[in-house]
Image (spheres, coloured by chain):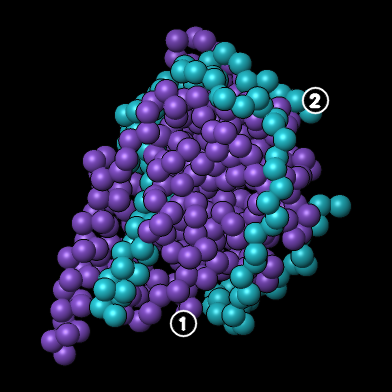
Chain colours: A cyan, B purple
Amino acid sequence: MTFLKITSLVSILAITAACAAPSAQHAAQSADHSAAATSHGVSAVATSAATVTAVPVMAAGSVLKVTGAALEEVGTGSLEAGTQVFEQGVGVARVPQCGVVPQTQTCVAPNGPPRLN
Amino acid sequence: MRRLIAIIAVALSTLLPIAAKAGSSAASNPVLPAADVAAFSNRVQQDHAARGAHVANVARVGRDPAVLPDGIDYTHVAFWVYSRIKRADGSTGMGYRIYNLYQRDGDLSRSDLVQDTPADFFAGAHSLDAGVIIPDPRLQQKLLRVIASPAYAALHNPTYSVLANPGSTQFQNCTEHTLDILMAALYDTRDPRQIKANITAHFEPQQVRLNGLQRLLAPAASQALTTADHGSVVRTATFRSIARFMQSNDLSDLTYRMTPDRLVRF
């Protein structure tokens, strides 16, 4: 019993690596690893030291290209891009327990379910 | 009583090193070969591009799944945004920039928003395994508008908790920030209270089973492990719970797992 409790605790705390920056784990292996180690913690939104600018684009067309400086400097993938995705079935949704999420924002009424149309 | 004290003492002595090292230790994690990381990173972004994804949600496995709680397989989630990139050496290209919320090195109870590269993203991985959600193209446009706006940073709460309650504004982790941005895009709102109200009404978080002793001890190991924002049951946002939310509301085009040799639909 004691062992189970400890093991369970360890498993929970193991996820303290969640959201950890590469610098906090092992970024030195990265082909382009200068970003997080030098920038995070300095400002609210930091950018990689190796990158001067990165501007999001909404280009036309259904197939985009990864080119030039955006490519990592080592190797290519073993599968072709856009490879067919195998079917495995959807994940099983866990049944939530009623009323377990505290209603912390009681003064704001929610909107309806999200719709894109 | 002596038995209880022994349990607590052993648990704390076991947990403290884990909590301490999780954010700063390189030695405690396996190191993936740089060439493999770079190749996999290229493969993921080329796959996104081939599918026409301007914005995707991507998750990585930061820890051995065997030690993670039931229902949690990915430990970090971020937006991958198709961008025009220019490097310091003047070279340019088109590819993906990663918009992360990372725990702060040296203070794991705080976080920062950090942009980095696909290889940076997977450099912290336990294995080359990506969870991918390609949002509906209409949602991608909405997401891009939020990500490129001041709202992206405004919706960041730097007070970090590993198990943050997504229905509360008290703490936030990378997955919750992702969910907040998603809700901001879906409902075209920047109001955190409205976002949390909608999350509480429409999003089903992943339950993490903890007993009273565990909840009592965890913050002693690290403030980032607090569950002070939860009621009697701990439930948090995860990659899978976001994927289920998007699938059940027809918000995603494709949800799949990518490894170096295959793609499998969730």
Q: In the rendering, at what x and y percent does residue B4 appear?
A: 20, 84
Task: For mark 1, name the chain.
Answer: B
Disc 2 marks a residue whose amino acid type is Gly
Location of mark 2 (residue): A61
Residue A117 falls left or right of residue B172: right
Q: Nearer the viewer, residue B9 or B136?
A: B9
Q: In the rendering, at what x and y percent does residue A6 appear?
A: 28, 71
- Asked if one can make out residue A30 in the rendered structure from this viewpoint, the answer is yes
- Is label 1 in contact with label 2 (beta carbons under 8 Å)? no
- Provide the secondary structure element on which disc 1 rests: loop
Compared with residue B33, is residue A4 higher up or lower down, i.e. above or below? Answer: below
Location of mark 1 (residue): B232
Task: For mark 2, name the chain.
Answer: A
Labels 1 and 2 in the same subunit: no
Q: Nearer the viewer, residue A105 or B5?
A: B5
Taking the spot 25% from the left edge, 50% from the top edge, the residue there is B21
| Farthest residue, direction right | A117
Disc 1 marks a residue whose amino acid type is Ser
Q: In the rendering, at what x and y percent does residue B99 appear?
A: 52, 39
Compared with residue B102, is residue B225 higher up or lower down, i.e. above or below? Answer: below
Q: Nearer the viewer, residue B61 or B216?
A: B61
Compared with residue B235, is residue A98 higher up or lower down, i.e. above or below? Answer: below
